[in-house]
Image (tube, helix red, strand yellow):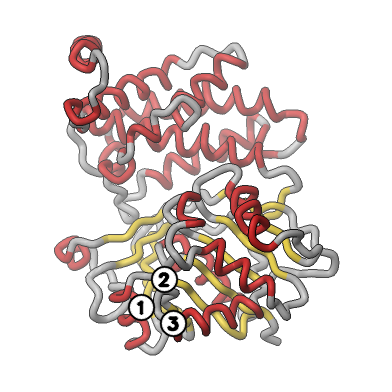
Amino acid sequence: MKEHVFVGFGFGPIQGGLFVSEAFKSKHFKRIVIAEIDRKLVDSIRSNNGRYAVNIAFHDGIATEQIDGIELLNPSVTSDRKELLYALSQATEIVTSLPSVAFYTTGKHSAASLIEQGLKTSTARATIIYTAENNNHAAEILEKKVKEKLGILENSVQFLNTVIGKMSQVVTEKTEIAQKKLTPIAPGIDRAFLVERFNRIFVTHCRIEGFRPGIEVFVEKENLLPFEEAKLYGHNAVHALLAYLGAQKGYHKIAELKKDTEIMQTARKAFLCEAGPALIKKHAHLNDPLFTDIGFKEYAEDLLVRMTNPYLDDPIERAARDPQRKLSINDRIFGTLQLCLEQNIQPINLAKGATAGIRYLLETQIWENQKMPYAEEIKNLIFKNA
């Protein structure tokens, strides 16, 4: 029996290729609604009768999944917003999948404001809100924003963090879409979702008594933070390291690195001899299989294969983008360096990635506009020693 209602915010590859896909396949949802402000995207899927395509990268090729019966609503359009608020008042599962947590309160009709209005008039027995932004405290941030307007939350409402290890992208070049034989999201729009075949997603344990989520494939954890750290200081750190080392050698795709013995050896050592032991030492007390030598080795080796999947064909430029954020002190590479030092592990290979990352940052930024002190001196020092 279809008893659940799904409402999502943002229609990118994680929303479309993971959350909506799993909600659709579960057959537990009587309605799947997405709030999206891209009018061309909304119109294209509406013209296609609520049907869209996702391209899935397997280890040996690409398959296309068609998903039916979804409704895209533009909150900036009055009639759409009214219908969206009605859907939110019935929603049992809400998913925010926005560019960052900063977008929770962006715009006149923000996600936080609409969720607050929906919860205020809710007729659902219970509602869980998954936050899919890449932030360890996204659920707490969104909950605070909603509470500022709503006040005390009912016991039947819970905000959940997520750890999403699924790699994905939007392919926008017509030639690339044709070359890879990808199916566009919908007729009339020159964009295609390309995601890997992976759905082992960790989420905060649902504590609403008697409530069973409609999406059943996610793995609930009582304490999600260690798994968020494993993703940030393991998966994300090594992915960025590969991108920056690859860029330094002139590669264009992460998959090309599979044949570069030197880079792959550096990545493997960074993962298995530095990040892994540091994470295991910190979280071994949890007695979770991931934080064991065997469990983490399986996790790392699987990821190194998935990252270099030629059918996912991840561009180095995409993996390396936003270097100022990715090279910040508590983010993937430098955050992992700190973790290793705290656990008395020498992060030699991670340091190679950090150096390559700084070089990438210096090569791609316009220093005159940023007025960074000693920019030329730093650039000369890095390039001399890289």
Q: Distance between the residues labelled 3 and 2?
A: 13 Å
Could one spot residue 202 in this view of the protein?
no
* N-term-proximal mark, 3 vs 2: 2
Between residue 47 and residue 152, name the one nearer to us: 152
Task: Name the image quarter holding the N terminus.
Answer: bottom right
Of the numbered discs 1 and 3, the one sitting upstream in the chain is 1
- Name the kind of residue labelled 3 in the image: Thr
Residue 100 in the figure: left or right of residue 256: right
Can residue 21 be spotted in the picture?
yes
Badge 3 is on which residue?
78
Direction from residue 69 to residue 93 in the image, left or right: right
Residue at 42% across / 28% down in the picture? 328
Q: What residue is shown with label 2?
A: 36
Asked whether 138 or 78 is in front, the reply is 78
Check if mark 1's residue and mark 2's residue have beta carbons within 8 Å.
yes
Q: Residue at x 67, y 85 (%)?
A: 2
Q: Which amino acid type is marked by label 1?
A: Val
135 vs 253, nearest the viewer: 135
Instruction: Give the residue type that dot 2 points to.
Output: Glu
Disc 1/disc 3 C-alpha distance (Å): 15 Å
